[in-house]
Amino acid sequence: MSIELHYKTITELADLLRTRKVSPVEVTEAMLRRIEELDPRYKSYATVMTDYAVEAAKRAEDEITRGNYKGPLHGVPIAVKDLCFTDGVRTMGGSKVMADHVPNFDATVVARLEAAGSVLLGKLNLTEGAMGGYNQEFDVPLNPWNVDRWAGASSSGSGVSTALGLCYGSLGSDTGGSIRFPAAACGTVGLKPTWGRVSRYGVLALAESLDHVGPLTRSSADAGIMLMAIAGLDPKDPTTLPAPVSNVLGDIEKGVEGVRIGVDESYITDGVDPELSRAVLEGIKILEGLGAEIVEMKMPEVDRYIPFWQTLCTAEAVAAHRQFYPSRRDEYGPYFQGWLDKGANVSGADYAEANNQRNECSGLLQLALQGIDALACPSTIGPAHPITLEQMYGPRDPDRDPAYQRFTVPYDYNGSPTLSVPCGLNNDGMPLSIQFVGHPLSEALLCRIGHSYEYATEWHETHPSVGGEPVAT
């Protein structure tokens, strides 16, 4: 499979499939060969659904041939984080206690991707319970840019597979940063939708009041394509929003003329890796050159609210795992076991105080973001850092440095949509990422901003090369 094909965007591949210049079966079989060749080293897949994928590709090919073209995901090979239930296929959540868990129904997001005609290649590895550390019974996905660097924790399999051309797009989840972390670490686009925009029915929970499900792709338009397929009201999930799903692609070529982008330079630079800060500020200048209105603003001091996230997340994780914890506590890996133990010691008063602090943070952000259309900032405080397998398997103290979640947790608190887009490489050749934060249900605008930035740059077209230098397509 040529690099020109396996690194095509969904948008580009869709045109080839629609016009029958390539077939879904051809693309799927080539992708399965690429997974077989590369994934034994990079370990992004928990389960490869070979037979299922080939049958789905044949079905898509027949439908397209008969003129029943469903849209830009029809015949496109994708993959989902192994939190998403798939009928008859094990869904393990990176946890030994669920190693034999085989659902008898599809998660809503999986069913909607299938309805859009996509080809599900398989389920992707993740940290245990979608938190910070891995269970020793499971593989750790390795960053394709440098296998000794962090791959982004929870949705790491989604970031690795998308970056390495082992699928055309994937689903991840974000409770404290786990769409944005792997997108930034692996050099992909990551879209965290508005909370409630995408159904969580049939998706294993970490902390239900914070969990978001969204796509990782290789372009902002592709993120919009996947979002349109999975978003919308779901009677099986009462927390989903009834607002109609926007046509993300409708105005994506409109540009950013007059779009008000908020910038607080201190927020972008204080405590942030200097190379990353410079890349983000350069990205903002590029958008200004495209006609965006840059609005100087002052961000509230959000760092002091971030430690309360641990109280919320640990307590809600205990609720999510009550079927297995504490009765099967010893089967959890050391990291997640420690996380659950902390949650079991959270009192009702502790949780109430943490929730009050969360609401206060969200209120301050609402005030700060008045008068702008989107906020520009980094996705993380730095590029992917060196890490060992021993550290990823634990045991590690679950007390994490709150500063690392400065650009993620506040927007899980308030449920705002965010888009992370590659904005450079540092001197070590690792990806850098700019993040755009919008108002509720503004995903179409965020994708338009990301698309405009991509049009003026080439970072989204730079990919990791197996055993060599980064490759630009």
Image (tube, grey):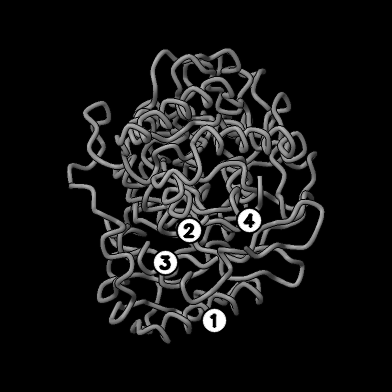
The residue type indicated by label 1 comes to Glu
Which residue position is annotated with label 3?
A: 451
- Please report whichever mark, 3 or 4, sits nearer to the chain's N-terminal start: 4
Q: Work out how far the residue at label 4 is from the one at label 2, CA to CA, in angstroms.
A: 16 Å
* Mark 3 or mark 4, whichever is nearer to me: 3
Which circle's residue, 4 or 1, is located before the other in the chain?
Answer: 4
Residue 189 seen by the camera: yes
- Residue that label 1 marks: 282
Q: In which quadrant will I find the N terminus?
A: top right
Which numbered marker is on residue 185?
Answer: 4
Please state which of the two labelled residues, at mark 3 or mark 1, is closer to the viewer: 3
Helix, strand or loop at disc 2?
loop
| Vertical position of residue 428 compared to residue 354: above or below | below
Dot 3: what SS?
helix
SS at circle 1 = helix
State the residue at coordinates (65%, 59%). 463
Q: Earlier in the sequence, mark 4 or mark 2?
A: 4
Q: What's the residue type where badge 4 is placed? A: Ala
Residue position marked by numbered label 2 in the rendering: 219
Q: Nearer the viewer, mark 4 or mark 2?
A: 2
Question: Circle 2: is it few (<14), some (14-19), or many (20+) Cα within 10 Å?
Answer: many
Q: Secondary structure at mark 4?
A: helix
